[in-house]
Image: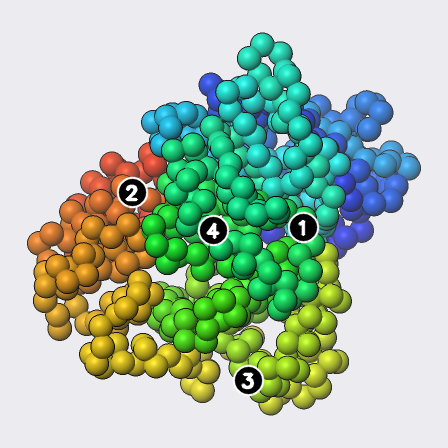
Amino acid sequence: MRLDPHSFADSGQPQTRSIDLELRADFGARVLEGEVALHFRSPGAGPLDLDTRDLSVRAVSALDGTPLRHELSAPEPILGARLRVELPAGSRGVRIRYATSPAATALQWLDPSQTTGKQPFLYSQSQPIHARSLAPLQDTPRVRVIVGSARFTVPSRLRALMAAAARGREPGSGDEAVDTFEMPQPVPPYLLAFAVGDLSSRQLSSRCAVWAEPALADAAAAEFAQVEDMLRAAEKLFGPYEWDRYDVLVMPPSFPYGGMENPRLTFVTPSILAGDRSLVNVIAHELAHAWTGNLVSNASANDFWLNEGFTVYAERRILESLHGREASELHATAGLHDLQVSLERFAARPELTRLRTDLRGVDPDEAYSTVPYEKGYLLLRRLEETAGRPAWDEFLRDYLGTFRFQSITTQDFLEFLEARLPGLAARARALEFVDAPGLPPDAPLPRSLRAEQLRRGETDPANPTELLVFLQGLAPDSVDLRELDARFGLSSRRSLELRHTFVLLQLRAGAPEAVDSARRVLLETGRMRYLRPLYTDLSRRHPEAARRIYEEARGGYHAIARSMVESVLKEQGALR
Ligand code: BES
Ligand code: ZN
């Protein structure tokens, strides 16, 4: 039986317990070339179905090197190509020699011109289903793997980092070196991650450091100085941190997400280096995933809200314990605004606004939105409010402890909830959140006194998050945007959170400088959170400019961002 709508992995076949990776990065050809060994949980026989995408499979053998019969099927649009290997009786694993494609969806190869230090850079982004373009494997969170050994051969002036424990550097041949890693905790394949570049680090505490290109390292260390405090706050709330180190890697601007919770090594966009620590909630979020997502993982994309809704909830609990209730409520207010925007965007596809989804035949990258984040958050908040915080906090720790290092469905969560807090789900009418589209009319509302004062114009914003909430509440034609800009220095802000919100106002007000302001943001970042709304509004009003700016900027975007922008432009008729 298939384990996951987005994987060929079959529950009747041997399951991988451990993998070994040996890869050489060829920056000239933009391929990784090498070998993966999959070791099974227990010996098996018969067919083994693996996920692949755009891989050149060179040889398949048993662990002892005996060649094995295998067949690579024609690729399917969302899933990629099934690799079926015929296992002889008593097989303990397989070994596959292969190469990735320059078009591998998990990889971005950057030219020296695309980094601050003008050095080549390579990184991976496996979530949700791109690990299969890095290596043939059972690419479903249902099959967690440890990494016995990973070896990356890279140019010796660069360094490989992996979301794993570093084991050291060995000399390679010529001007190459081999960076080695191991990952003793079992993780879903979507958390397999690495980066190669000119990277240096700054220690933040005994178990935390930040990595970045040398020119950004000091700024990053200053921005993220509170990481150890966050970690302690999170441990107090959710139990011990199980991953040993917590490091942060600042990615090049093309990184398509705000952050990615790769274990031991969160990847973040450089756009959160606002200079004033105003965007460190992204770090709180990725750190929180160490519990909600990495320790307890969604079983498939259908249950994505178990990762993201819980993590937004956990993120705001961390913020609350460090900066107080008003600060976390303000974030929740901004989140509710994002949720309303997403619900409108999916008006024609309401089924994608349920928390529990059925994504058979749907590309999870296309279903991606803020809904599982903020609607999930509101459900958990409702459960907390109904149970009372002490009982709810005890439940949370119990949940994390019970399902640690497992991948679960929404049903598993609901059954566990019923067993531990009988009747709570019914009293909170949880199923309305879980299985109905949209937002229940009586969903909990964040209560921020500051947000209300700001919206009534009784006070001026006193920090960047207040300013954001204030801007989100403005109607474009009700304000003098030039005056607003002069008052708050909006168009010269480092924070793209603020700047893109202001540019949206300019676009909607038809301000003459809007196109140029939009262009500057669109050239500065590849983060989809900013690209999507800006291209949507820009192409509605200025389709020709949208197309032109995209042509100029697309080289700096990740493939996933490019296809998202292209579908936005097509929808608006700005691109054929
Ligand atoms: N895991 C996500 C990013 C992701 C989701 C990548 C799905 C690929 C597929 C990450 O934890 C995340 O949610 N990032 C947010 C951070 C924000 C909610 C603070 C982002 O990128 O904006
Ligand atoms: Zn997340």
> Which residue occupies 78% across, 32% down?
94
For marks 2 and 3, give the CA distance.
Answer: 41 Å
Amino acid type, callout 2: Glu
Could you tell me how far apart the alpha carbons at marks 1 and 3 are, in whole angstroms?
Answer: 31 Å
What kind of residue is marked 3? Glu
| Front label number (1 vs 2) | 1
Instruction: Indicate the quadrant where residue 91 lies.
Output: top right
- Residue at the (81%, 35%) spot, across then down: 93
The residue carrying mark 1 is 243
Drawn side of residue 321 relative to residue 542, left or right: right
Q: Nearer the viewer, mark 1 or mark 4?
A: 4
Q: Residue at x 53, y 19 (%)?
A: 155
**Is 511 located above or below residue 102 in the figure?**
below
- Circles 1 and 2 in contact, beta carbons < 8 Å: no
Q: Which residue is mark 3?
A: 385
User: Quick one: which residue is furthest to the right in this view?
Assistant: 90
Q: Indicate the amino acid at tag 1.
A: Trp
Q: Is mark 1 within 8 Å of ligand 1?
A: no
Picture layout, residue 11 above or below residue 24: below
Of label 3 and label 4, which has the lower sequence position?
Answer: 4
Image coordinates for residue 385, horizontal then vertical, percent: 55, 84
Marks 4 and 2, the one that precedes in the sequence: 4
**Residue identified by numbered label 4:** 225
Looking at this view, is 62 or 447 the one in front?
Answer: 447
Disc 1, SS:
loop
> Of marks 1 and 2, which one's residue comes earlier in the chain?
1
Residue 68 in the image, given as x and y percentages of width and height:
79, 27
Image side of residue 547 versus residue 333, left or right: left
Q: Which residue is mark 2?
A: 524
- Secondary structure, mark 2, is helix
Within-10-Å neighbours for mark 4: few <14, some 14–19, many 20+: some
